[in-house]
Image (spheres, rainbow, N blue to C red):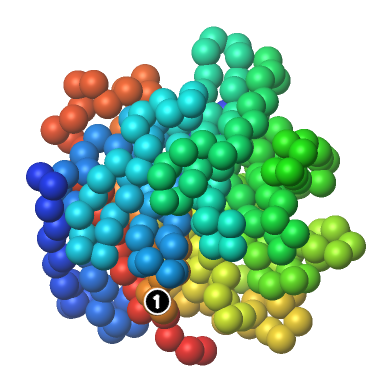
Amino acid sequence: MKSSIRKFVLRTGFAAVLMTCLSLAVKCHAQVIKVHIYPSAVNLVPEGITADNRTGKIYVSSIAQQKIVVIGQSGLVSDFIPGNTEGFGEGLGMKVDARKNILWALSNKRKENLFTSMIHGFDLKTGKVLNRFVLQDTIPHLFNDLVIHETGELLITDTYASILYKYAPATRELTEWIPAGKFQYPNGITSGGRKDLYIATYGNGILHIDLQTRKIQPLPGFKDSSYAFGLDGLVYRDGALFGVYNAKEYNTNAVIRYNLDRSGKLIVSETVLDSGNLNFKDPTTAVILNDVLYVIANSHLDQFNRNKETVQGIEKALSPLTLLLYPIKDR
């Protein structure tokens, strides 16, 4: 989630428009970008995205409507869960557990000085809630993003508290896997296999964590520090990290690829896949499906925040859900 949210750190139908890079060819490295616009998916303030590689379905969480929508292979959009299902709040990070047919989703709510952060596990076929955990505190918390460990446990970033949690679904127990004080403002998180974990943080840049020893170290080798310290979503694929940058104005929003060395602990090259795309209006997170990187282009989080965290009165200013598609190529 973009750091400015809450200001703490800081028709059913489908249209696919093919955009060549044209004057942006240098920035886009002359690759073809597809723009998928969903006219029926309006006023979502979309934030999180994940996919089921078996079915090709894409899931998008909504902050404004506190729900999750699903996009079928035909491009039709429908509610996976309606708003406020079993207390579901402002939707953020999500992941699909294909082995157990569960969609794990994080959400948050705030009422005055009471912060509520939630974990929901939904049956992928029915949308039924299979697992639920609620953390309430007067100390600020924000469950932001997650990965699913090979054990089936979840590792969850808490941006406000600067904690990395472990959640055990079987016992519904939440523990501090890495306590506060080790890094600042963790955001997107992705797994690089059995040993490597990567976290985008606003305070420390991109971090590598050894899953076995929990050793934390900065990921060196980046060229542009403003990108490295301003990433929201983070995705790993075959020795590369893909980050979504949204820390400043729309015309600086970007999607960046970082190629890693064999150890996974050093960036050896950095490529800006896209920058200043006219569809960018606070891009947030990404997912890879069938060798394509899908990026939420237009969360409109800045407008949502400036409007006292509501879409009322600014509906006409918010564009429908837009995903940008980038083909993933070899190094």
Q: Which sits in the foreground, 329 or 266?
A: 329
- Residue 65 found in image quarter: top left
Instruction: Please report the residue visible at 72 percent of the width from the left and 52 percent of the height from the top.
Output: 153
Outermost residue to the top: 112
Residue 63 versus residue 192 in the image, above or below: above
Residue 165 versus residue 260 in the image, above or below: above
Mark 1, residue position: 290
Q: Which sits in the foreground, 40 or 250?
A: 40
Q: Which sits in the foreground, 313 or 224?
A: 313
Instruction: Please report the residue visible at 44 percent of the width from the left and 69 percent of the height from the top.
Output: 53
| Mark 1 surroundings: few (<14), some (14-19) or many (≥20) residues within 10 A | few
- Residue 52 found in image quarter: bottom left
The x, y position of residue 268, in whole percent, is: 63, 82
Instruction: Please report the residue visible at 25 percent of the width from the left and 45 percent of the height from the top.
Output: 78
- Label 1 sits on what residue type? Asn
Outermost residue to the right: 213
Can you see residue 203?
no
Q: Is residue 41 left or right of residue 60?
A: left
- Residue 8 found in image quarter: top right
The x, y position of residue 110, in whole percent, is: 53, 19
The x, y position of residue 113, in whole percent, is: 60, 12
Can you see residue 117?
yes
Outermost residue to the bottom: 331
